[in-house]
Image: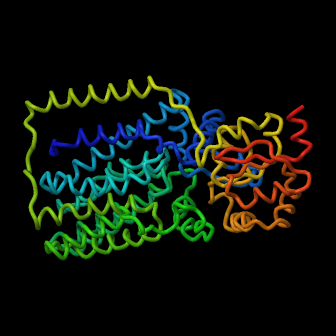
């Protein structure tokens, strides 16, 4: 064991996930559980949409199918507490692996500083979504590549199993192939008589990694899905795909400031290939705030060895005597057991939030729920989870640019456009946030009445449906 604080960092990360309400605050979590339930019930991976009102039957392969199965199984076993345990374990494992990787090159003070920067980058994305299940695999894969590069050899073939699992958990796996190619390029430029032999082995490993990425339900299309998503113009309206906001101090800015200090103030120089990778990650983090996680985590790992070699590193051998490790491990295990028991002993009850109109939907009669609905984009996942077929949800790859552009135009508040859409789909009720421009239009629209309203959502229904519900 090379790091002194890895187990405690893992314990802190796990505890944070177990008891932070924001972890369950994303709408995708709801439909991902529903997708996993469907696959468990039918014993087959989805190949067409079974949930949507407007995209029903359209070809759709969930590229995070294995995560969704795990989420559904955890929810079935332990409810929301079981789901939090799953993600707490993933976060704890990821931070433990990250601490071990950084401690390999850095002294404890520098390793902790790098780890805190990485943690700050992870925090905005600390959600019950598949990327957090892939988080420890991202770190294990990157660490395996960097360790092979530092030892002047190609990565070991068993490392491909990490990528295989990653590819079926989350769509970010092409990044793993790109990192392998980049570090293979760095290896080809290294000094030494055997550099070409090592470079060819890196090339073979990278080609094998690309082939492994095809072993998913999406096949070739799944490999290129991230590029297709990046090309969608409709993503500009989705918060996580928007650019980083620098009005407050975002994690990406902290990482860039730290890199500038190390480069300009301490004279640390990165190998050219790693510098290019870091600059690419900075660009991604600035363009899409969701990619700050990648910048913080991969950036820390890419820079750890050069910083350690040029500034100083910790002991190359075990930092904690073996005789002292057992009591520490026992304390960590006892603390973890207490956290798990507390989490399972305190029920998690879904509450109203920006993605979960719990009370509003509870006031919609069962018969009305089966009728076509117009919903807010953020409410779509919760509607699917509750057995309602939404007009739209957050599966942007399913709906496509054209539909999402039309939906954005609809939200602009044009009365004629709204009336045409209601008639086209035979919409019988709507559920929208109070601030939506469509709410006053529906208030004034003949034949429509409010059925329910609170601080999270407003429900309208055709007048005949309201009378039926109240009778």
Residue under the image location 31 percent in, 56 percent down: 118
Residue under the image location 30 percent in, 65 percent down: 255
Count how many numbered circles sit on residues in the image.
Answer: 0
Residue under the image location 14 percent in, 62 percent down: 308
| Location of residue 105 (image quadrant) | bottom left
Q: Is residue 285 visible?
A: yes
299 displayed left or right of 84: left
Residue 330 percent location from the top left of the image: 21, 26
Colour logic: rainbow
Placement of 145 over or under 77, stated as above or below: below
Placement of 301 over or under 11, stated as above or below: below
Residue 384 percent location from the top left of the image: 68, 43
Residue under the image location 17 percent in, 31 percent down: 328
Residue 400 percent location from the top left of the image: 67, 64
Nearer to us in this view, 141 or 373: 373
Residue 85 percent location from the top left of the image: 43, 34
The C terminus: image quadrant: top right
The N terminus: image quadrant: top left
Nearer to us in this view, 330 or 197: 330
| Location of residue 232 (image quadrant) | bottom right
Q: Is residue 192 visible?
A: no
97 displayed left or right of 281: left
71 displayed left or right of 110: right
């Amino acid at each position: 064991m090379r790091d002194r604080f890895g187990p405690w960092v893992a314990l802190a990360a796990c505890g944070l996930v177990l008891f932070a309400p924001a972890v369950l605050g994303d709408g995708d979590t709801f439909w991902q559980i529903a997708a996993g339930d469907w696959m468990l019930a039918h014993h087959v991976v989805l190949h067409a949409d079974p949930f949507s009102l407007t995209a029903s039957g359209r070809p759709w392969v969930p590229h995070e199918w294995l995560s969704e199965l795990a989420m559904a199984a955890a929810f079935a076993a332990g409810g929301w507490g079981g789901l939090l345990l799953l993600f707490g374990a993933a976060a704890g494992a990821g931070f433990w692996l990250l601490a071990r990787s950084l401690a390999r090159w850095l002294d404890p003070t520098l390793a902790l500083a790098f780890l805190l920067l990485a943690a700050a980058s992870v925090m905005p994305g600390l959600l019950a979504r598949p990327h957090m299940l892939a988080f420890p695999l991202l770190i294990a894969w990157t660490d395996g590549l960097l360790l092979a590069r530092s030892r002047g050899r190609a990565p070991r073939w068993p490392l491909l199993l990490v990528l295989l699992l990653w590819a079926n958990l989350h769509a970010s796996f092409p990044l793993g192939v790109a990192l392998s190619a980049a570090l293979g390029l760095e290896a080809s430029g290294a000094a030494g008589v055997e550099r070409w032999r090592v470079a060819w082995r890196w090339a073979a490993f990278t080609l094998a990694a690309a082939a492994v990425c095809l072993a998913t339900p999406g096949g070739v299309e799944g490999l290129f899905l991230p590029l297709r998503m990046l090309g969608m113009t409709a993503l500009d309206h989705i918060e996580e795909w928007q650019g980083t906001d620098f009005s407050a101090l975002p994690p990406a800015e902290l990482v860039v400031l730290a890199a500038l200090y190390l480069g300009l103030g301490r004279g640390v120089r990165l190998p050219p290939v790693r510098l290019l990778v870091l600059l690419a990650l900075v660009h991604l983090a600035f363009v899409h705030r969701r990619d700050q996680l990648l910048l913080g985590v991969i950036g820390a790992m890419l820079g750890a060895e050069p910083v350690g070699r040029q500034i100083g590193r910790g002991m190359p051998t075990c930092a904690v005597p073996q005789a002292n490790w057992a009591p520490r491990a026992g304390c960590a295990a006892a603390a973890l057991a207490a956290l798990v028991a507390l989490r399972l002993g305190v029920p998690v009850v879904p509450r109203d939030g920006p993605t979960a109109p719990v009370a509003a939907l509870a006031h919609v009669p069962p018969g009305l729920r089966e009728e076509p609905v117009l919903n807010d984009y953020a409410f779509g996942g919760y509607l699917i989870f509750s057995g309602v077929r939404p007009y739209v949800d957050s599966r942007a790859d399913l709906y496509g640019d054209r539909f999402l552009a039309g939906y954005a135009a609809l939200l602009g508040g044009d009365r004629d456009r709204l009336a045409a859409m209601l008639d086209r789909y035979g919409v019988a009720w709507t559920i929208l946030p109070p601030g939506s421009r469509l709410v006053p239009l529906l208030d004034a629209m003949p034949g429509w009445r409010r059925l329910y309203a609170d601080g999270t959502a407003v429900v309208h229904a055709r007048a005949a449906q309201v009378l039926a519900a109240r009778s």
